[in-house]
Image (cartoon, rainbow, N blue to C red):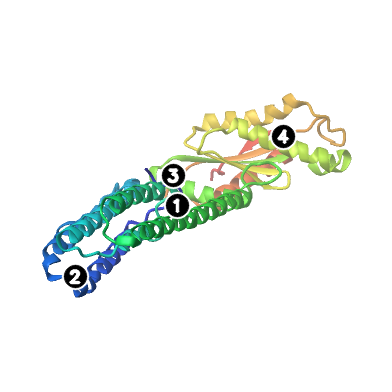
Amino acid sequence: MHTDFRKVDAKLIRLLSFVGTAILSSFIIADLSVLPASLEDVYFTSRLFVQLPVCIIFFLLTFMPSYPKFHQLTVCSVMLALIYSNYWLIIQCWKLDGFAFPYEGTIIYSLFAIFVFRINFISALILCGIALAGYTFLTFSYPVYGASNFINLCFVASSMVVGLLGLYQIDSGLKKLRMVNFKLTGLSQIDQLTNIFNRGTYEIRFSEQLELNKRVGNSVCVFIIDLDSFKKYNDGYGHVQGDKVIKLQADMLSQIFRRTTDIVARYGGEEFVVVTSNNTEQECEKLAQRIIEQWQSQKIPHNDSNEQDHVTCSVGYYFEVVNSDSEKELIVEKADKALYQAKAHGKNCFVRYREKRT
């Protein structure tokens, strides 16, 4: 049994186990007030030498780094140990003194596992099934509660069914909520036209990647890509065709920059930005060349352009081996300047920004 979508907070589990142990201990005073003196030894055996040590062991297990992986199994095992210890106590009290020890602990332990420790539905189903099997055996083997035996069994079974139904409803609602959140997260990160990152996501990811590369001294290269004379194309061929060209540009970039560390995003309008790291200068130049060649091979007519007969793009890029002084804004600014130089050189080309030597 492992956890599903829940994140196990070990500190919270420790607190809850402490509270649960305190509640269990508080029952001792109440139990002793109605328990015959002849049953105190067997009672303390169950409570102090079985149930309390089980609770302490559970508390200590939560300090293990691997505990979250075994949360479901651990909770079920602990609760079943407590429940069956209670069954043993019920049987002993009846055998030794004919005393009907309260059975409600079975319900409390089960509901505590379901709603306080938040085990998943499958784990809860197994827990309740094993617990109910034990109580059913107790009911038909020992007439502890006399005429109320079967009624008590029905009450215990009904309580567990209600708990399971409640958990199922909660789990279903949480799963739906998680799916909605997942979709909303996707909508907030992805440009809906091109299905690549939007500018906001690019800003966040580039900042994170730059900080990471600063620590190891990797290279970073920023490419800014702009479709040439796109406004004229959009006006002449229509917005639908213009959107197709923008989508095609996004697809091309995604094919070229396929590493998991590459950041491909729509910068705005017909402009795109790509961030790649740990490449050589020669590799970055080849990547820029590939972007240009992709459009040249498409040969999509652009009769409204004064410079080219087909749809083309211009690329400006800046390469830097980053250090602690590197700034994201300055890197992007230099790539942007290179793009302007590419436009000034007649478009349909790439330009690398180089620092002016003094």
Q: Residues within 10 Å of mark 2 (few under 14, many from 20)?
A: some
Per the model, the C-alpha gap separating discs 3 and 4 is 30 Å
Indicate which disc residue 325 carries. Answer: 1
Pointers 3 and 1 in contact (CB under 8 A)?
Answer: no
Extreme residue in the front direction: 147
**Which of marks 4 and 1 precedes in the sequence?**
4
Q: Which residue is mark 2?
A: 35
Q: Nearer the viewer, residue 288 or 173?
A: 173
Q: Position of residue 305 (x, y in %)?
A: 84, 36
* Inter-mark Cα distance, 2 to 3: 69 Å
In whole angstroms, how far apart are the C-alphas of marks 2 and 1?
75 Å
What residue is shown with label 4?
248
Q: Which residue is mark 3?
A: 213
Sequence-wise first label, 2 or 3 = 2
Residue found at x 25% / y 68%: 22
Among the two numbered marks 3 and 4 on one chain, the one whose residue lies closer to the N terminus: 3
Q: Residues within 10 Å of mark 1 (few under 14, many from 20)?
A: few
Amino acid on which disc 2 is placed = Leu
Q: Secondary structure at mark 4?
A: helix
Marker disc for residue 273: none
